[in-house]
Image: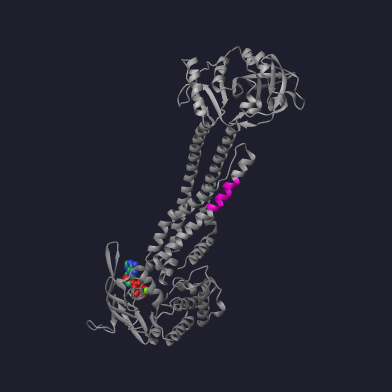
Amino acid sequence: MTGPAIVATGVTRTYELDGVSVPALRGVSLTVADGDYLAVVGTSGSGKSTLMHLLGGLDRPTGGTLVIGGRDVTSLSAPELARLRNEVIGFVFQSFHLLPRTTARDNVALPLVYRGVGRRERRARAAALLERVGLGHRIDHRPNQLSGGEQQRVAIARALVTGPSVLLADEPTGNLDSATGEAVLSLLESLHADGVAIVLVTHDSEVAARAHRRIVMRDGLIVDPAPTPGGDR
Amino acid sequence: MRLAEAWRVALDALRANRLRSILTMLGVVIGVAAVVALVAIGTGTKQQIEQQVEGLGSNLLIVVPGRLEAGSVPSVSTLSLDDVDAVSRVVGDRSRVAVTVASGETVRAGSRTTFSSLQGVLETTPTVFVRTLDRGSYLTRADVGTGRRVAVLGAGVATQLFGDRDPIGRQITIGGVRFRVIGTFERLGQSLGVDRDNEVHVPVTAAQRLLGTDRIDGLAIRAPDRERIDELGADIVATLGERHPDTDFSAVTQEQILGVLGDILGVLTGVLAAIAGISLLVGGVGVSNIMLVSVRERTREIGLRKAVGARPRDIGLQFLLEAVLLTTLGGVLGMALGIGAALLVDRLTPVPAAITWWSLALAFGVSATVGIVFGVVPAQRAGRLDPVVALRTE
Ligand SMILES: Nc1ncnc2c1ncn2[C@@H]1O[C@H](COP(=O)(O)OP(=O)(O)OP(=O)(O)O)[C@@H](O)[C@H]1O
Ligand SMILES: [Mg+2]
């Protein structure tokens, strides 16, 4: 890919709630380069999740410009944005978000359904990724038959199955005990070693310290590193 | 997303809520079954009536006093046997003209009695209408000429009065007057709601004497030529009009009778099908309702699918297919139930039923359409969900 994976410039996001404006992001500029490993920390309500949704093309900014995979999000239609999410981004959520009653393999294969990949190839690729995250023996298990750490590894395999350039993880270890969380983290780091850019939201300063860069958010702004006027970071 | 994939997802969703899916389908099942069964009964009845009217014989022209118009009062007949001679001259062949003077009479043989439809007729009746004898012989021209007291019994009357014994040559009394049985008819069954095995045919002259009248009720003519049947009817009506200036006469053909009956039955079938269609509509509303519930329940799933790249129309299609699957499965079950009900009615009741392919095709098409129509709103709602909001939903 040419240029950085994601470029946000002066991005704002204001929620309208019963006629009241809630500014969740108040002007965030951020570049996620290929192969980045970035931790996002900050107090609760500082806008971390909001930022992640924007970076992943799940939401649109109220103001500023946001370029994902070389395309300006504001100019994209809903289906085009969906395609961008499918091709460029992989999401990992705190609460896993696996489909119930669906096997690990079919959960992992889900993004490929929307890319029009045939069933046989989907199943093969999903199986290979489950192998990669160490769940080769759990292929036909359903989420309720898996531990939390295993479920999160299935979710990571699902995020990777389309070969995205950026993996966005919003508190991926938040629902896991420290040992399991550690396993998930080292999995993420091995992916980073393979060249996937990782953006990780965390409350844990030790986890944040392992990232190559760290940004701190407060009240919808990046406060560390301190913003340089008009600058990019 | 490929269509095959969307079908699979829709089917999985229905299977996950099996009982609910079945209960939702029930509305459509009942609606479709009702449409199929009612249309089958309507069609069967219509076919039966057509057969029976045609079974009277072809090129039949029936002449009655009065105008055949809605709201007209049926006139008392002023026709007599002299008129029959005049009509015979118009037709040019006496053997093509039949008459009746009819009355309900008690018939007795020994200690057994039955109430039957006495028909005073000419010897021409078996030629003009299609009537075949089982035993004995029919009335002759001489019987009619002399008013001989001889009778031909319908199969039902014969059984009522004589059981298994041969009635030929035996005495009966009709309205207290003695007649001799000379023949019996083959069994005919019901026709247009009339039990045709309950008839007793006697010479019209003998019947007139018994009933104390010189009138006849009506005439029937078997026209020699199908093309000229309307012309012949007009000639006969004109001739009778000259003889009875104060009375109107009408001549109707089988086609006209069939046309009127067909119209009535068509309206009736249509009304029944419309009522059944309303229950289909109610079933559709049920489908819509359940689909909205389903969308709400699976909001998180929708959010996740969108997060990994589902477009609004992928999600919409998934839910639309789910609705269509519900109604078409319901439609197929309803068809099976409707066919079963129609066959049972046909077998176990005197009401006939005939399954027609178009009614099945219609029922299937309508149930699929109901799915689309009532699935569109929930599907659009699902497709438009904001993925961030959807993922946050508990
Ligand atoms: N859909 C919404 N409608 C209205 N306000 C919202 C909505 N989503 C988030 N907010 C508000 O925006 C602000 C930022 O929320 P966000 O979820 O991004 O915080 P966060 O940094 O992820 O917090 P946490 O660490 O608790 O997850 C909060 O004040 C929140 O109340
Ligand atoms: Mg958050």
Q: Quick check: B99 left or right of A97?
A: right
Residue beneath the point at 40% across and 64% down: B313
Q: Is residue B382 above or below residue B346?
A: below
Residue B124's spot in the image, x, y percent? 63, 23
- From this viewpoint, which residue is outermost toward the front? B92
**Going 57% across and 20% down the picture, which residue do you hit?**
B88
Quadrant of the displayed image that contains ligand 2:
bottom left
Name the main secondary structure of what is drawn in magenta.
helix
Q: Is residue A213 magenta?
A: no
- Residue numbers of the magenta segment: B331-340
Q: Residue A204: where, in percent of width, then height?
A: 39, 81
Residue A190 placed where, x, y %? 45, 86
Quarter of the C terminus of chain B within the rendering: bottom left
Which of these two is toward me, A38 or B219? B219
Above or below residue B178? Residue B285 is below
Nearer to the camera, B53 or B241:
B241
**Residue B312 is drawn in which quadrant?**
bottom left
Of B334 and A40, nearer the camera is: B334
Q: Quadrant of the N terminus of chain B?
A: bottom left
Percent position (x, y) of residue A217? 31, 79
Observer-nearest of A193 and B358: B358
Can I make out residue A181 in this image?
Answer: yes
Dividing the picture into quarters, in which one does residue B315 lie?
bottom left
